[in-house]
């Protein structure tokens, strides 16, 4: 493999955006900007931006702490305060960080929230998490936006109406109160237009993996690509510029017939194309990724890159239906899809992206993803006759990342894929 | 055998019949009858009753159901109840159920509803998204749509059009049911030795699988029986049992808690049967609205309800005081996120407020309780020893 990759322009753009946000968070005392804690799935970035607030995503802090090897200490701290070993480790990492002074991953203190905006999409833990935070920040305004689950595989008019009413009568008035900014529907429309553009670009970007070789890894690199669109930049010209640039860079790779860039440079040969279900492990992210690229495995699609929105099936924010489309956005995030919908989405990805296999990374402490994964895997195996692999790890608790177990399992899995490929090729020869 | 004993015995049999034979027999008695299974915590059973149905609680297989197939559906770090429910449905123990309702409570139950859909179990599967918005025109309206959806599903099965009168009649029966249950709790608070938690649990749980009319009769008989000065008081402390609202502890554990020196005078074991506080309006022209209104304004606190406007620790503390209890036993099913994520909220508040508690975890299929019994015993002893006043339940 070639040496450490040179920073692409898109990477610089992303870095600037993220640093800009953290700088702004550092300066809230001077600027008086209000701080809104919220979650990635079903995040109302456009609305937060409409009120000139700054978003903080506790789960992003948790995963960044994990990548910087800080999560173990925070988790232990939370466990010292009665948090169970068995619950979502994002929560514990965040609570531990808060107990220890709320010093964020960048090393500066994250300001206290003015608003706890629970746009409660696809995971019950979010609700418990904010109940816990509310007790630590009694002065924060609490906003709850209940997102109905797509239990029947659809968004009914009643579901949308319920959400729009909440937005109109609860969310927006409370945000006006906290921010002191009057709601401006025109501003929201403009922001939604830009959000839509960014969504178009990201959808195109994830479609590039249909090429052979795939120019990107849609899981390990994909988690970087979804950053801006998920953490508050959707609806900005900067995000549009970033995704446009990224797309062009990727298309350049396609033209040159290049495979994905890994932390150790370019992947020389694409041996296996996989679809992965479940979040990644963050504590040992690079080691984890390396197991795949060392084997020539590239992830051509993943469910995790859709936690902050599923754009594959054509859904986009619509400036002409602003509140309705905010509602639909929340309902349409991956973990808000029911199990048959998840199966059908993953099956579509496996087929359309010509995947050789399907791998589940089951996260110990995330029921939102994990409960049902085994049944989904079996269903996909039966229907598509695709080889399935199963590994277990955790998001941010290093105690539950066993490198040797995962490596062994994946090696056997890749052996199976190799045999199948061999048989297939001999039959077709 | 006294009348009370025989009621308890028959409740025990029916409550733990994993083939739900009584529901099957009931359904066979008349055409148009339907059986609708529901999972914890709460569903408005009134609407099933009004549609000519029998709502049947599904609380897992407990320690009575060996798991063979269910484990293939769930990783080891997921609670036990979904695997035993899968086992039961795959073993055809619920083949006579026409539909299933999965109330919103946690991601496991939610995703289980999708697995039922995927497998095509029953004629309908409905995930009941209980509102988290408590404004009647917003959350109330949404909740009414949810109930109408279930009514529609049931109508597709038996063709029955449900009238306001039907619903009001059902509401009356369930109002009576809740009233009788609360009367028994009140009496048990005063005289807990007259009906042990184990016995009471059988009676209460039977109510989730038999027709409400029949359950009301049984409750009434139990109430009459325990109005008499029966049993002998023991030197035990009164406690509230909290956190066991979904996957149920094995009976052995319930017994162990009381045997270790406690009287459990309040609990959330069958929370759904007691979710609504006080009667629901049974004269309304719009009974669904009445049910929704009661849920929005008069629910018990629950792990499944976003509580920031009514902190759960305050409500639990009030319950402890109301029941004159000396402490709380937090019992959570292993890997039960809602219960385990609530635990620090309760415990940190109780530490500040000087309220006593212990906490442990259980699993429905585990019936070794030696350690828990010792812990509970030590907890009870410490309260007896350190309480300013002696534990009041020790005197008749
Ligand atoms: S349980 Fe899963 S989806 Fe929910 S907050 Fe934790 S990691 Fe996110
Ligand atoms: S025991 Fe807890 S985690 Fe398991 S299904 Fe019930 S509420 Fe959910």
Image: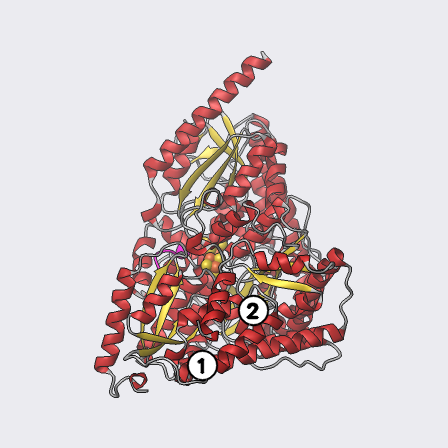
Question: Which disc, if any, is residue A144?
Answer: 2
Left/right placement of residue B251 relative to residue B92 reads left
Q: Is residue B258 above or below residue A340?
A: below
Q: Quadrant of residue A160?
A: bottom right
- Expressed as whole percent of the image width and height from the top left, the position of residue A116 reads 50, 69
Question: Which disc, if any, is residue B236?
Answer: none
Q: Is residue B207 above or below residue A206?
A: below
Q: Main secondary structure of the magenta part?
A: loop
Q: Give the magenta-colored segment's residue range.
A: A83-89
- Expressed as whole percent of the image width and height from the top left, the position of residue A95 reads 37, 63
**Viewer-proximal residue among A84 and B232:** B232
Residue A84 magenta: yes
Query: Could you tell me which secondary element the residue under label 2 belongs to?
Result: strand
Left/right placement of residue A364 relative to residue B154 reads left
Viewport quadrant of the N terminus of chain A: top left
Residue for badge 1: B226
Circle 2 chain: A
Q: How is the image coloured?
A: secondary structure
Would you say residue A425 is visible in this rendering?
A: yes
Q: Is residue B234 above or below residue A410?
A: below
- Expressed as whole percent of the image width and height from the top left, the position of residue A237 reads 61, 53
Query: Could you tell me which secondary element the residue under label 1 belongs to?
Result: helix
């Amino acid at each position: 493999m070639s040496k450490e990759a040179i920073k692409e322009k898109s990477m610089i753009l992303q870095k600037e955006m993220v640093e800009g946000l953290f700088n702004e968070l550092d300066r809230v005392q001077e600027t008086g900007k209000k701080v809104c804690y919220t979650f990635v799935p079903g995040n109302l970035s456009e609305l937060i931006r409409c009120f000139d607030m700054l978003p903080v995503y506790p789960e992003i802090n948790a995963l960044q702490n994990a990548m910087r090897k800080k999560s173990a200490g925070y988790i232990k701290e939370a466990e010292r305060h009665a948090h169970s070993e068995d619950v979502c480790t994002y929560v514990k990492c965040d609570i531990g960080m808060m107990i220890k002074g709320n010093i964020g991953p960048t090393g500066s203190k994250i300001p206290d929230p003015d608003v706890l905006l629970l746009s409660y999409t696809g995971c019950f833990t979010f609700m418990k998490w904010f109940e816990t935070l509310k007790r630590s920040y009694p002065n924060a305004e609490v906003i709850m936006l209940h997102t109905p689950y797509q239990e029947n595989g659809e968004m009914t008019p009643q579901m949308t109406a319920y959400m729009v009413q909440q937005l109109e009568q609860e969310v927006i008035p409370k945000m006006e109160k906290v921010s002191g900014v009057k709601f401006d529907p025109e501003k929201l429309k403009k922001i939604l237009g830009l959000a839509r553009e960014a969504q178009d670009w990201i959808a195109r970007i994830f479609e590039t993996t249909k090429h052979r070789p795939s120019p990107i890894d849609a899981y390990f690199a994909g988690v970087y690509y979804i950053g801006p669109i998920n953490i508050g930049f959707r609806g900005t010209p900067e995000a549009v510029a970033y995704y446009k640039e990224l797309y062009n860079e990727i298309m350049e790779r396609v033209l040159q017939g290049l495979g994905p860039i890994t932390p150790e440079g370019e992947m020389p040969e694409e041996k296996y194309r996989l679809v992965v279900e479940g979040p990644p492990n963050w504590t040992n992210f690079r080691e984890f990724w390396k197991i795949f690229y060392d084997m020539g495995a590239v992830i051509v699609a993943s469910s995790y890159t859709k936690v902050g929105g599923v754009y594959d099936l054509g859904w986009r924010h619509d400036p002409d239906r602003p509140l309705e489309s905010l509602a639909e956005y929340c309902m349409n995030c991956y973990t808000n899809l029911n199990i048959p919908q998840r199966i059908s989405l993953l099956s579509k990805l496996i087929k359309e992206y010509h995947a050789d296999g399907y791998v589940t990374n089951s996260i110990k402490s995330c029921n939102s993803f994990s409960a049902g994964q085994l049944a989904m895997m079996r269903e996909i195996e039966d229907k598509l006759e695709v080889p399935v692999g199963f590994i277990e790890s955790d998001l941010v608790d290093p105690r539950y990342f066993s490198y040797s177990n995962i490596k062994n399992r994946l090696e056997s899995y890749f052996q199976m894929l190799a045999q199948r490929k061999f048989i297939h090729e001999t039959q077709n020869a | 055998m006294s009348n009370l004993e025989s009621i308890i015995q028959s409740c025990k049999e029916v409550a733990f019949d994993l083939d739900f034979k009584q529901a099957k027999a009931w359904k066979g008695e008349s055409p148009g009858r339907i059986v609708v299974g529901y999972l914890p915590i709460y569903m408005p059973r009134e609407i099933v009753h009004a549609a000519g149905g029998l709502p049947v609680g599904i609380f897992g297989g407990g320690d009575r159901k060996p798991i063979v197939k269910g484990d293939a559906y769930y990783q080891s770090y997921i609670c036990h109840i979904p695997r035993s429910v899968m086992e039961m449905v795959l073993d055809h123990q619920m083949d006579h159920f026409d539909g299933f309702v999965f109330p919103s409570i946690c991601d496991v139950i939610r995703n289980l509803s999708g697995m039922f859909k995927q497998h095509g179990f029953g004629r309908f599967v409905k995930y009941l998204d209980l509102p988290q918005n408590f404004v009647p025109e917003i959350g109330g309206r949404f909740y009414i749509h949810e109930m109408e959806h279930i009514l529609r599903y049931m109508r597709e099965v038996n063709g029955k059009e449900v009238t306001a009168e039907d619903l009001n009649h059902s509401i009356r029966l369930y109002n009576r049911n809740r009233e009788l249950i609360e009367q028994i709790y009140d009496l048990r608070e005063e005289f807990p030795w007259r009906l042990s938690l184990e016995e009471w649990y059988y009676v209460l749980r039977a109510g989730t699988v038999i027709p409400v009319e029949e359950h009301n009769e049984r409750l009434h008989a139990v109430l009459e029986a325990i109005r008499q000065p029966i049993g002998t008081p023991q030197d035990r402390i009164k406690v509230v049992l909290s956190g066991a609202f979904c996957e149920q502890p094995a009976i052995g554990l319930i017994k162990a808690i009381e045997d270790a020196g406690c009287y459990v005078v309040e609990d959330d074991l069958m929370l759904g049967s007691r979710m609504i506080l006080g009667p629901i309006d049974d004269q309304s022209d719009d009974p669904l609205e009445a049910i929704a209104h009661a849920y929005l304004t008069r629910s018990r606190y629950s792990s499944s309800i976003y509580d920031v406007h009514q902190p759960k620790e305050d409500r639990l503390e009030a319950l402890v005081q109301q029941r004159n209890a000396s402490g709380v036993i937090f019992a959570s099913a292993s890997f039960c996120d809602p219960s385990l994520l609530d635990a620090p909220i309760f415990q940190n508040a109780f530490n500040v407020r000087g309220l006593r508690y212990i906490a442990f975890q259980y699993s429905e299929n585990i019936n070794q309780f030696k350690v828990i019994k010792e812990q509970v015993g030590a907890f009870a002893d410490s309260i007896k020893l350190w309480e300013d006043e002696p534990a009041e339940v020790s005197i008749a």
